[in-house]
Image: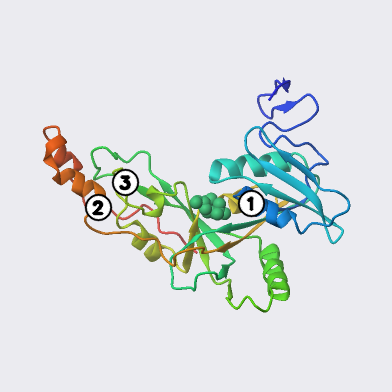
Amino acid sequence: MKDVISDANFPRTKDGRVYHLGIRAGEVANRIITVGSLSRAETIASMLDSSPESFSLYSERGFQTITGCYRGVPVSIVCIGMGAPNVDFFIREVRECVRGDMLVIRLGSCGCLTDLPVGTLVLPKASVSVTRNFDFDFANGDFWEPPYRLSKSISADPELHNALQVSLNATRPATLKKPIFVDAVNASTDSFYSSQGRQTSFQDYNSNLIDHIKTAVPKVTTLEMETFFIFHLAASWRGRVHGSSASFPPLTTRPVVPTSPSPRSAEANSTSTEAPGQASILHEPPEKPMIRAAAV
Ligand code: R1P
């Protein structure tokens, strides 16, 4: 982005545009639906009033902001892509472009850790985060550090959560027979792979992670990558940012987590390309309990 004013704390262009979303005051509404994919943003935007004409901006950094009115009420749809860093750009930069309260609802997809039917709409009342512990020695194994950390839980904004539930119940087409589930806690992860328990070619020490999350977090139901970070920032900003979330489990009711043999076990057993000692390096020590059980 050109012509950035050199304010290291909060860079903007000379005409007042925030650095990553590319918008400025007047181009984003206080009521925001955030999504991860452009097609989802466009589908929702197609429901906006035809007049006044919507504003739309796709930033150099890949954030799409569409602002218009729904039944006369100003609303924005912001496509942020995935993960905590993008949530951080989104919440902080929009916060600098609006006055008064800022209401954020995430509409996204998720994995489901229970036997809820695929297509159930889940509105989590709280979320924890699951993050990779960078102090754990992933190359050699580590008896002293846990490979993942679970945070304490943080609640959705209760008023927005209730309003969303009431509104969805009132407006859901009768043909949609799947329930809306609200007695749920979400877990947001910092990786789609390691901290969601997927077994890949990397040594992630995560074969018992899903079971650990289910044991440590009462009512944990969904697994995705943004909700916790929205709830956390909303709660941090002196009560003027309100966050809620609704997710659909799109494909499976439970992530597939093979227990054995894992790809790296197979790798360890294949001696042809191993350096001396590599098999023992690949030996996985018993995983210690993750550091903190989440209190929900
Ligand atoms: C990973 O594939 C993405 O899908 C889920 C996760 O939170 C992550 O963003 O949500 P969305 O479909 O809403 O992006």
The residue sitting at 49% across, 73% down in the picture is: 117
Q: Earlier in the sequence, mark 3 or mark 1?
A: 1
Residue 31 in sight from this viewpoint: yes
Q: Earlier in the sequence, mark 1 or mark 2?
A: 1
Q: Which residue is mark 1?
A: 39
The numbered mark at residue 262 is 2
**Residue 226 vertical position relative to residue 222 in the rendered view, above or below:** above
The residue sitting at 22% across, 58% down in the picture is: 260
**Residue 144 vertical position relative to residue 163 in the rendered view, above or below:** above
Label 3 neighbour load within 10 Å: few <14, some 14-19, many 20+: many
- In this rendering, the label closer to the viewer, 1 or 2: 1
Q: Earlier in the sequence, mark 2 or mark 3?
A: 3
In which quarter of the view is residue 87 placed?
top right
Amino acid type at image mark 3: Asp
Amino acid type at image mark 1: Ser
Q: Where is residue 120 shown, x and y percent of the image?
A: 55, 71
Give the left or right position of residue 234, taking residue 73 as reference. left
Give the left or right position of residue 82, taking residue 235 as reference. left
**Residue 19 vertical position relative to residue 84 in the rendered view, above or below:** above
The residue sitting at 60% across, 42% down in the picture is: 88
Visual colour scheme: rainbow
- In this rendering, the label closer to the viewer, 2 or 3: 2
Q: Which residue is mark 3?
A: 204
Q: Where is residue 113 shown, x and y percent of the image?
A: 43, 66
Distance between the Cα atoms at labels 3 and 1? Answer: 32 Å
Distance between the Cα atoms at labels 1 and 2? Answer: 35 Å
